[in-house]
């Protein structure tokens, strides 16, 4: 009986020993030994010094706003730590030279075809005189130039905005979007502000063009009823931009009612709200599109910069007569 009684007791003793070893091993794994920090403040300060050394080697590029301004001649950080102004006037000059050369080539080609490939002989002196020997008034080349010529009718350049109340930008909130505020204000909110525009009215916006385009100051007249305000062909030559709402019925009654012709003689711009579908009819027009956030007003300047960059580039190329030094 003795050996039989000693067997279970020995096994129980062995189990307790293994359980104790397992507990000690687990506690050693959970122990903070080896992870002590002698001086937390000293470690943090050392990390700060390391961060300062790293950031001192960084080259600042700027935020989203400064990047947008950089293309328009804004000041950016130079390699020597100073400010450097980017000027793209040379690029514009090259583009204009190419445009003029292509225009002369097209004109020469059309003249050659109309004359059967032979140069026309100048008329005799007697044919250049009218009745009584008086010479008829001569027409200078600029008098028959297209609307994009340097001679434009007197008055400020014109921007047309939609007249429909459902449009994102109308005469009511255009003073906030195109003016100094440079932010989108919903129509129902703008109606409560005394600075809001009124349908059928006019307001003016004065802006300085980007330095890459000469830095000239221009004053624009903003209207929404060209069918009644612009009666003469020369009035339409003052139009430099049209904010469209995406449907061709907006142009009903206009002298330039064909979207293809309209957006050849003026800069086209469409503003839509985030998430809204772009009108299908708009996709066939020469129109630049942009979006307005429904709740993030900090993004309004991106849409505004897109509009004014397009307007100023169009004026500098096609309506240079408005640029007065």
Image: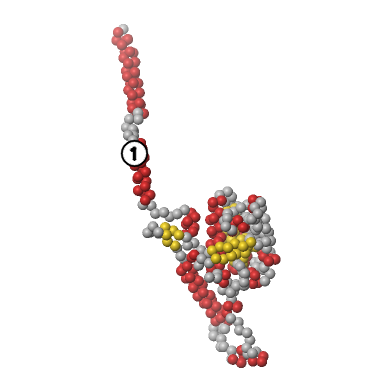
Q: Report the residue at 56% width, 54% height from top.
A: 300
Extreme left residue here? Answer: 3
Please determine whether, in this image, residue 285 is positioned above or below residue 8. below
Residue 99 x, y percent position in the rendering: 51, 72
Q: What element carries label 1?
A: helix
Residue 180 x, y percent position in the rendering: 57, 57
Please determine whether, in this image, residue 32 is positioned above or below residue 191. above
Q: Report the residue at 33% width, 27% height from top.
A: 28
Q: How crowded is mark 1: few (under 14 residues within 10 Å), some or many (20 or more)?
A: few
| Left or right of 252 on screen, residue 51 | left
Q: Report the residue at 62% width, 88% height from top.
A: 135
**Image quarter of the N terminus:** top left
The reply to whether residue 20 is in sight is yes
Q: Which of 115 and 276 is in front in this view?
A: 276
Q: Report the residue at 62% width, 58% height from top.
A: 175
Q: Nearer the viewer, residue 198 or 246?
A: 198
For disc 1, the marked residue is: 42
Extreme top residue here? Answer: 1
Q: How many labels does the image show?
A: 1
Res 303 → quadrant: bottom right
Please determine whether, in this image, residue 22 is positioned above or below residue 60. above
Extreme front residue here? Answer: 194
Res 239 → quadrant: bottom right
Residue 298 x, y percent position in the rendering: 54, 51
Res 12 → quadrant: top left
């Amino acid at each position: 009986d003795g050996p039989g009684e000693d067997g279970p007791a020995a096994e129980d003793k062995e189990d307790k020993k293994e359980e104790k070893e397992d507990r000690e091993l687990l506690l050693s794994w959970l122990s903070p030994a080896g992870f002590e920090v002698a001086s937390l403040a000293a470690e943090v300060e050392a990390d700060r010094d390391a961060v300062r050394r790293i950031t001192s080697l960084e080259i600042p590029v700027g935020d989203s706003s400064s990047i947008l301004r950089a293309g328009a001649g804004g000041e950016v950080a130079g390699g020597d730590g100073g400010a450097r102004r980017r000027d793209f006037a040379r690029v514009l000059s090259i583009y204009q030279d190419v445009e003029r050369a292509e225009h002369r080539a097209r004109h020469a080609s059309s003249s050659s075809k109309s004359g059967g490939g032979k140069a026309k002989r100048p008329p005799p002196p007697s044919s250049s005189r009218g009745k009584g020997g008086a010479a008829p008034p001569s027409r200078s080349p600029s008098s028959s130039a297209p609307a994009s010529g340097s001679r434009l009718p007197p008055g400020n350049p014109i921007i047309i905005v939609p007249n429909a109340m459902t449009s994102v930008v109308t005469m009511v909130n255009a003073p906030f979007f195109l003016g100094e505020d440079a932010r989108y204000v919903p129509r129902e909110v703008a109606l409560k502000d005394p600075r809001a525009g009124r349908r059928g009215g006019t307001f003016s916006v004065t802006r300085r063009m980007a330095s890459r385009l000469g830095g000239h100051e221009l004053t624009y007249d903003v209207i929404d009823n060209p069918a009644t305000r612009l009666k003469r062909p020369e009035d339409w030559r003052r139009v430099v931009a049209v904010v469209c709402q995406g449907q061709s019925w907006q142009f009903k009654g206009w002298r330039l009612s064909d979207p293809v012709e309209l957006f050849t003689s003026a800069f086209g711009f469409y503003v839509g709200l985030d998430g809204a579908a772009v009108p299908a009819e708009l996709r066939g027009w020469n129109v630049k599109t942009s979006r307005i956030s429904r709740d993030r007003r900090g993004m309004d300047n991106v849409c505004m910069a897109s509009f004014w960059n397009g307007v100023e580039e169009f004026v500098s190329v096609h309506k240079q007569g408005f640029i007065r030094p």
